[in-house]
Structures are given as structure tokens and as C-alpha cells.
Amino acid sequence: MHTTLIRHFRPVPKTIALAAVIALTALSAQAAPALGSAQTFAVLAGTTVTDAHSAPNLPTQIFGDLGTSPGASITGLTSGVNVNGGTVHANDPVAQTALTDATTAYNALSGLAFDTNLTGQVLGSPGLATLTPGVYRFDTSAQLTGTLVLDFLSNPGGNFVFQIGSTLTTASDSFISVLNASAGSGIYWQIGSSATLGTGTDFAGNLLALTSVTLDGGAQIVCGRAIGLSGAVTLADNLVSNDCSAQAFGTGLGDGGSLGFSGGPVTPVPEPATSMLFLAGLAGLGATRLKAWRHTR
């Protein structure tokens, strides 16, 4: 194991309507959608969730809801033992609604205009080790190796959105360090097929994969979520928390009150179209998350 250090009818005047359209256009490239009811989940899958425990490793611990829909198979995980701070939902109405909301979020993320195309580059490699809020595009696959720093300093209430055309894979012991996060901070990984976190990876943010998510032995998402929309989430002695301000498993990590880098608590506001989800509130200044390399496993 490693040791870790702190880490929103009436007709309106045309001028007001025009101003609203201009504001929407300016914000759409930067404002990520709320996860809706999926925000309460730490792990959510379309088919199955399975966990394979290997002694003497500590068993998987999940803080937040765990669910599947339309599948109903959850293997190797028990409420109160592996799942705390939430409820197990096997294809019940709660899980069904959450999957619908997660799918809406996935589609909204996919539709954002990107700021930077990183196709062919490796996250965490020299020259690409520190990023600021924005929408980053990979036309096909994406890889993470070593250390990736996501720094909210220039925009504490902003969002990191990674649009990945096919797969996301991380090298063993790679990690993500998040700096200067606030209650409005968001980190979203929209993945066109599947995501695999290598052994010992320390990940941050919300994995929304169109098919499946796999966490290899000892990988963790202490501040975020693992969501496989149409496939499985496969675990092996992992840590996953959707709110590391409430439960960080002793790692000392923090998310600035953003509820696992999902923009914090969201108060629903009636809107005429689902596209208005892009205007999820962004507010406040908060704590930082800093990841330091852990020396022993």
C-alpha cells in the first residue's frame, strides 16, 4: 500500500432572450452536465458488477450507492461489508433512473465542443503532465502513465472534460493529482467504449464508459465514480468513493466539497429542454487535493 498526503412562462424582452442565448453559447463548451440521480452512486453498471477478492489484500470498499440496470447481477459485494454510505440497487427503479441520468450526462459530455485535441499523446508524459480546466479530445484511445496534475487554480469552479473516442487505459501505479479544487469543480471522463485502470492506479473523477469499466488490483477512485452504461464494472480489491470529503478511506484525499468532482450538490431548476443541463451551478472556493507518491505497497 501507499501512504498519501492531502490531496436552476412568461415572454421576455428580445434583448434578454438574446443575452441568454449568448450566455448559453459561451458556457456550453465549458459547463459540464449534472449527473442527476447518478450522483449518489459510486459504482453503476448496465449488466453486472463483480468483485474478486485476493487475500491478503484488503477487500473492496465502496462509499455511495452501488447499482445495476437493466442487469441485476452483483457478485462478491455485500452491503455493510463492502458497501457503506449508500445502498445496493439491483435493477430497481432507483438504479433504472440513475442509468438514464448517467446516459444523459454521457451524451451531453460527448456533445461539448473541445478546446484541445490530444489524439496520439499520452497523459502524464513530459509536456502533458499538468492541465488546466477545459475540454480535451482524443479521437480514438487515450493512455495515462506516471503523474497527471489537474490544476483548478485558473478556474476553481470549472470542469475538466476528457472525450475519448474508444478506450482509456492507465499504466500500473499511475495517478492523478488534483489541485485547487472547489465545491463547483468537475472532472468527467466520457469514454467511447471501455476503461481499464491498471494495478495500483490512483484515479480521480467520473468515469462514464459507454460499455465497461475495469479496476485492476489495488486501483482506486477515492474521489469519483465508475459507471459502465451498457456493460460491466469489474473490481478487484479496490477503493471507490463518490464523496471523499465524507469518506476518503484514510488516504487524506479531498475534493473541495464537490461530491467526487461532480460539481457538488445540485438544486434542480425547471428548464424547457434537457440541453439546459449544461448550466449546472458552479460556485465557491474550497480545498485542494494533492497526491503524493506512496512508497510501499
Image: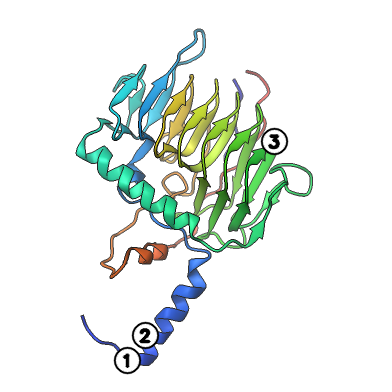
Residue 155, quarter of picture: bottom right
Amino acid at the residue labelled 2: Ala
Q: Using the image, tell me which numbered label, if any, was put on residue 13.
A: 1
Distance of label 2 from label 3 (alpha carbons): 46 Å
Which residue occupies 26% across, 45% down? 97
Dot 3: element: loop
Q: Is residue 249 visible?
A: no
Q: Measured from the top left, where is residue 180 in percent x and y?
A: 58, 53
Q: Measured from the top left, where is residue 11 in percent x and y?
A: 25, 87
The residue nearer to you, when weighing 296 against 59, is 59
Q: Which residue is mark 3?
A: 145
Which residue occupies 73% across, 48% down? 128
Distance of label 1 from label 2 (alpha carbons): 6 Å
Amino acid at the residue labelled 1: Pro
Q: Residues within 10 Å of mark 1 (few under 14, many from 20)?
A: few
Q: Which residue is mark 2?
A: 17
Image vertical order of residue 193 relative to residue 217, above or below: below
Image vertical order of residue 179 relative to residue 216, above or below: below
Q: Measured from the top left, where is residue 259 in percent x and y?
A: 41, 46
Q: Quadrant of the N terminus?
A: top right
Name which of mark 2 and mark 3 comes first in the sequence: 2
The residue nearer to you, when weighing 274 against 31, is 274
